Image: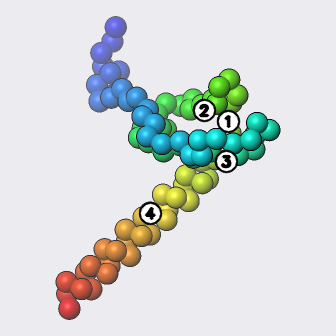
Amino acid sequence: MNYLYMIGFNFQSPRVRRVWPLIGPRAGGTDVTISGSELDTGNNVQVLLGRVPCHIDRLAVIIIIIIIIIIIIIIARTMFIVLSS
């Protein structure tokens, strides 16, 4: 085995903390939110409910990240204004 390829690589395991909602209609169509850490690990991310594959809405994830960044910037600017006054 060539260990040069393993330098700087960390194995990560996805950890699910919350799934919402817990129930939905049998007909399907319910948006399910899964939160946790390391959920985007690997190049072939899949979500199955039972044996049914789910569509992953990556745009929603990107929008949430952008909103969080904006909130952090607003809080940081507010703290800077308060501290410099």
Lower sequence index among marks 2 and 4: 2
Give the class, few, some or many, for how many residues have Cα within 10 Å of label 1's Cα (few <14, many ≥20).
Answer: few
The location of residue 58, given as percent across then percent down, is: 60, 48
Q: Which of marks 4 and 3 is in front?
A: 3
**Residue matched to label 3:** 31
The location of residue 68, given as percent across then percent down, is: 44, 63
**Dots 2, 4 in contact, CB < 8 A:** no
Q: Residue 47 bears which disc, if any? A: 2
Residue 83, above or below 75: below
The location of residue 47, given as percent across then percent down, is: 60, 32
Which type of secondary structure does the marked residue at label 1 adopt?
A: loop
Q: Residue at position x 70%, y 28% from top?
A: 52
Which type of secondary structure does the marked residue at label 3 adopt?
A: loop
Q: Which amino acid does label 2 sit on?
A: Val
The location of residue 78, given as percent across then percent down, is: 31, 81
Cα distance in 3D space between marks 3 and 2 = 13 Å
**Residue matched to label 4:** 68
Horizontally, is 29 left or right of 39 in the view?
right
Give the class, few, some or many, for how many residues have Cα within 10 Å of label 2's Cα (few <14, many ≥20).
Answer: few
**Residue matched to label 1:** 54
- Picture quarter containing residue 84? bottom left
